[in-house]
Amino acid sequence: MALDSDTSTQDAKMATNGQKEDAVAVSEAGGKAVSFSTDAAGAPVGGVGAGSTSVTSGQQPAASEDADSTAVTSGQQPAASEDEARKMAVIDAGYKRLCSDATLQTKKDGYFMTFDSQVIQSVPESQFEEFKQLKTDEERIFFVWNLPPVHSIIKVRPFCRNKSAKAAEDTKQAGNQLFQQKRYRQAVCQYSQSVVRAPPPGHDDEGDLLSIGFANRSAALLHMGEYALCLRDITAALAAGYPARLRYKLLDRRATCQLKLGEVTASRGTLQELKTALTVADLNEKKMAAWQKDLQNKMDTTSKMQDCKPIMLQAELEQPAPPPLPSRSGHFVSASAAVDVAHAAGEGRYAVAAQHVQPGDVLVVEKPHASVLMAEKMSTHCLHCLKRVLAAFPCAACSGVVFCSPECAAAATYHRWECTILDLLQASGMSVLCHLALRLVTRHSMQFFRELRPELEKRRDPTVRPCTDTEGHTFDPSSYLAVHQLVTLGELRKPEDFFHRTLMAVLLLKHLRVTGYFGELPGG
């Protein structure tokens, strides 16, 4: 839940799907909420989103006892000298600057810092005085975009981690060795790298790398008892053009998984497909006879069985649902009736308790409007849902990200625009919040913003109250307008800070432009 107060911080428990267990949501200047969650093993998932998932009430954590903390009792405050006050003011200003810089650039060796420094050095004082007089973000963007050094210092070109047939072949062979050693989990990791690096079907140097990578991984997953994942890999292998002469292996594996999952009727249908596939199988007479005998035995066995779902697998197959809200707020669709949103001059919008709240009550269940995976998690967690991945599904164009399923890969429509620039964005050293700002754009089409422009223009009027107050408005976190209306606290920013942030916005714009997002040809 994003709050608008510059200094507001809330501790929150978050119940999420999959392996995410708990999280902490912290509101940051501008009203953006950052969530850090952990998977079942306790490792940080590293997702950042403009929203949180589930917030429950509870006790405040006890204050830590360290050498720098001072306990004050009976409501008495220790007296502070003027010197101490000045020192605290300096420390506070330095801390704010440090936090502000961190929201722009996280890595000091990224090229944005160099770019920023060179552009600033090239701008004469008189020109910067003009920038200081600008009042709107639009004016600042146009001003910085028209500075010649912005385009002469950096030439943006598409760059990403491409597919590699050699890398796919090498990791496939490594997986085969691990499989022979019965180290199935390690084999799955190698096969996953193979399918991520393998060129798509139809590529000149691809051959059958992608389909064989999926097929080999399905065999390892079968040995691990991951029947649902095995079935998914078999489907992917067949879709990727697995050779017809070898297809009987996949069909036999699929029938086995279906039986393990209690899908007897489906297994019977697969066995019929297997019977046909054996007619074109690359088998000698002796092996063919053995396969046909085994097939007949399986067909006889399944003819006496009925569909069922093994009890031991039910918990694995059923995804946990978010906790239900006991009631709905009239102004905040993701919150219970115990929560309302208020507004105050100088404080912005904030959540308030509309009624008594018991410890453990579910207060908010909400999906983030947008989320971004930390760069260091790109190879181990799904780009879209942020879950830890066992059997990765690839992007069709790059090797820089992984998905947990074909469904997540299809849902990540924003990656179409980020695919060819993702490595560039990471090399810039930009913070994950800057990437989140870009994601708020790429998750929508340019046509979406063209149609929304009249409403956005209207909401620039400072007399138009945000759509999250209690005067008959409803806050819908799935609406882009709700995010667009988050307060910027621009009145607290200095011209120098505005210039740095405007330069980052222009750099993101330059990257987005080469992807063709605006209808231009890539590189245009």
Image: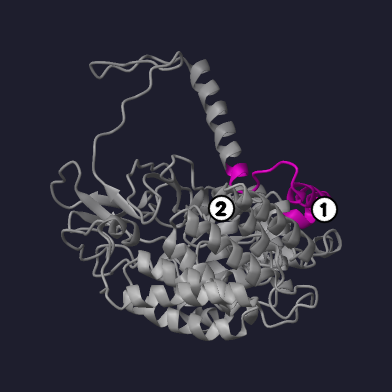
Task: Give the residue displayed 63% in from the left and 58% down from the top.
Answer: 191
The secondary structure that most of the magenta stretch takes on is helix
Task: Give the residue displayed 50% in from the left and 66% down from the top.
Answer: 405
Residue nearer the viewer, 426 or 489: 426
Residue 449 x/y as whole percent: 53, 78
Q: Amino acid at mark 2?
A: Leu
Q: Quadrant of the C terminus?
A: bottom right
Q: Nearer the viewer, mark 1 or mark 2?
A: 2
Snapshot colouring? one colour
Which residue lies under the disc numbered 2?
433
Q: What number is the disc on residue 371?
A: none
For the view shown, which residue lies furthest in the left direction?
356
Q: Which comes before the other along the chain, label 1 or label 2? A: 1
Q: Quadrant of the N terminus?
A: bottom left
Residue 149 x/y as whole percent: 84, 60
How dense is the environment of label 2, judged by Cα within 10 Å: few (below 14), some, or many (20 and up)? many
Residue 174 located left or right of residue 356: right
Residue nearer the viewer, 397 or 226: 226
Residue nearer the viewer, 485 or 303: 303
Residue 505 x/y as whole percent: 65, 61
Magenta run includes residue 115: yes
Q: Amino acid at mark 1?
A: Pro
Span of residues in magenta: 100-128
Residue 16 located left or right of residue 433: left
**Looking at the image, is 487 positioned above or below residue 356?**
below
Task: Give the residue displayed 70% in from the left and 69% down from the top.
Answer: 209
Based on the displayed image, in which of its 4 quarters is residue 10 positioned? top left
Magenta run includes residue 450: no
